[in-house]
Image (spheres, coloured by chain):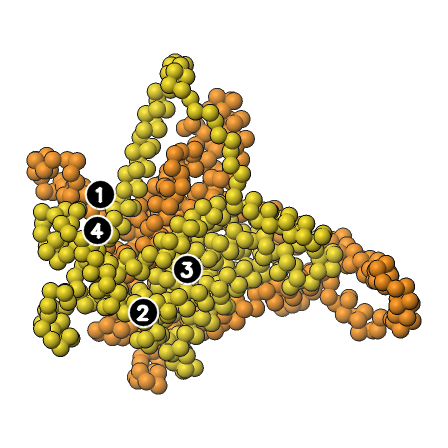
Amino acid sequence: MQSEKLKNVATTGKKKLFNREPKPKKPRMTWDEFVVNFKRKAKQPRFWGSVALNIGMYILLIGIAFIFLYPFIFMIITSLKSNADLIDPTIGWIPRNLRWENYSMAFQMMNFKGYIGNSLLITAVCTIGHLISCTFVGYGLARFKFRGRGILFFLVILTIIVPIQATITPSYIMFANIKWLDTFLPTFVPSFLGLGLKGGLFVFLARNFLLSLPKEMEEAARIDGCGFLGIFFRIVVPIVRPLLLVILVLSIVWHWNDYYEPSLYFKQNMQPLSSGIKELITLSKLTPEEMEQRLGRPVTDDDIINTATVMAGSFITLTPLIVMFMFLQKQFVQSVERTGLVE
Amino acid sequence: MKRGEEELNNEENKNLNEAENIAPVSEKVENKKVKAPKAPKEPKAPKAPKAPKAKKEQKPYKDPSKFTVWLKRKINLERRAALEGYFFTLPLTIGLLIFFAFPLGLSLVLSLSELEKMVGFEMHWVGLKNYTDVLFNDVSFTKALSEVFADTFIKIPLIIVFSLLLAIIISRNIKAKGFFRVVFFLPFILGTGYVLEQLYSLGVVSQALSLDSSSLIPPSVIAYLGVDFTAMVNSFLKIIVSVLWSCSVQILMFLSGLQSISPTLYESAGVDGATEWEKFWKITLPMIMPIMVVNIIYSICDSFVNVENGVLTLIKNLTYGSGQSMPQAAAISWIYTLVIMIFVGIVFLFLGRSYGADTTKGADERAIRKAKKRRYNW
């Protein structure tokens, strides 16, 4: 019985973290009330100024939102254009006829079936690695005093600052020597050690978040006889839920879009989806003769790979991320606010 | 020498830190003393009364052996914390040694030598030749570096101003808050990987805000203004768009900072008759300064590590492309890293000291520690 009660408390606690209770709705104003209210407000000294400010604010916001949305909309629309529509300068935005074949074409030519599994595997394993290792290490850096902590933290910052190109050649040679090339290990292992793609950033983030949390709960647990691992798994991990969510989203996005390391370390059949887009881009730049050589038969109208196909491929690649972000959006933004993020 | 000093200091310190050092230990001992008799009592209540008696006979209180006494004396609370700290950071330490320090060291060696064979990685020492080659004989590196610097200097103030402005607007109680937040995060999803490169190369990103493609201004007006003027405005708009596209993470950071400012400050300022403008300068800006510092440093790192950055493409070309020369690439990357470190260090020196790049709640603790260090010269 008691445990059930506790469970209930725990689950409601979780829910309250993310879902605020709905505010009681105000009864809607009638028109007359609105007019009266407006007249009263208009007499106040700074009313018209604030109205102008509000309008300016919304114009700015909508303008900037347009700048951000423009390439995205362009991508979707272009991906549906036929070859004739692409060339025709009179067609600005709306294509004459939607060409859905671009998508099936992109699916085929970017080897979607072959690459999606790799992409999922790399993203999932590396993200799990980051979730575990970065909280673990961040907890160590935030809560315990030991000699060399400052140096360790400085090195973490250094991993953020040093561009990956600076160390990529020696690490390639190293991986070649220990025969890790053409396996997934070069990306998996560092991510489980708190490094990997932007791992330093996550460690930094975890440390800062844990520094801003109160210590008292852990001290209480220690006095009650909880071991240090128990404290970490039973007390710290449940508290840092928002941090985990932030790391989850950022890490998924970065790993999904990453192409630099995979293109170096992995075999052709182990590449993620982003390298499929690269293939599409190179194919779209081929002349018809080269294309003929590749296919081994004369090029028909259906074989043409153009910007529309590339855009379709890009949209296919980005769709999982966008869907994920739509679902996690609310929690994510709230978590970001709670984390005192980011770097 | 250091050790001797430390020991001396420790001795000096013992008296001063007595309260701190001894208190936790004694607490611990007390805890154990209290616990020990409790332990057998607990099973008594629910289960049969016979069992604990037998247990008591089997396990009388042990006299602590010399070893445990020694261990207890050695492992006080501070040392235990240190050990646990080492345990928690062990993965990072291993990772840093293998995957960071080793390649970095190897690249240093590489930059100081000439490659003879790629296969076995045979090389011989040539000293600073690669560095002087890169710095004085080859124009491309210094040119790319100066370009990157100019780019950074122009963009970073703009990024900070824009992201602060947008964050302030979003943090207000506006309509469609969620929508704008998602949209402002969109560049982050698009902004890594090939997709954005493709969009950039098509010129789509900057098309959103430029005179040529705008339908708001009639073409006759543009023709009247002249080619030079439109080109100038267009390049300016291009910079603004690219700045906006690299704002998303900074907006999130500022948002979190703004959320942490207590609303009571604004209320009391409002009661005292402060305008919005005054509130911004007197409350928002000082309160957000620590995050601003973090933001500036993040933006600097971001713009230096950016994919489209000239120096990095140079390194890439030298490593894999035509005119291959790995030692030179290593030399360039080392110079580049040092330059970034100096740059970030200067920023820290000017801003970080007064505002503390990462101050939240550990600040007072840190201040105490610093004061101690200064006083006892640890």
Q: Decide if residue B340 is in sight here.
A: no
Q: Residues within 10 Å of mark 4 (few under 14, many from 20)?
A: some
Subunit of mark 3? A
Amino acid type, callout 1: Leu
What residue does disc 3 label?
Answer: A252
The local secondary structure at tag 4 comes to helix
Mark 3 → mark 4, Cα distance in angstroms: 26 Å
Tell if the residue under mark 3 belongs to the same chain as the one under mark 1: no
What residue does disc 1 label?
Answer: B209
Mark 2 → mark 1, Cα distance in angstroms: 38 Å
Q: Mark 3 and mark 1 in contact? Answer it, CB < 8 Å.
A: no
In this rendering, position of residue B311 left or right of residue B166:
left
Q: Decide if residue B286 is in sight here.
A: yes
Q: Mark 3 and mark 4 in contact? Answer it, CB < 8 Å.
A: no
Chain coloured orange here: B
The residue mark sitting in front, 2 or 1, is 2
What residue does disc 4 label?
Answer: A77
Amino acid type, callout 2: Lys
Mark 3 → mark 1, Cα distance in angstroms: 30 Å
The local secondary structure at tag 2 comes to helix
Question: Residue A62 lies in what quarter of the image?
Answer: top left
- In this rendering, is residue B222 above or below A140? above
Chain coloured yellow here: A
Residue B83 or residue B253, whichever sits in front: B253
- Residue B173 placed where, x, y %? 43, 33
The residue mark sitting in front, 3 or 1, is 3
- In this rendering, is residue B177 above or below A220? above
In this rendering, position of residue A188 left or right of residue A70:
right
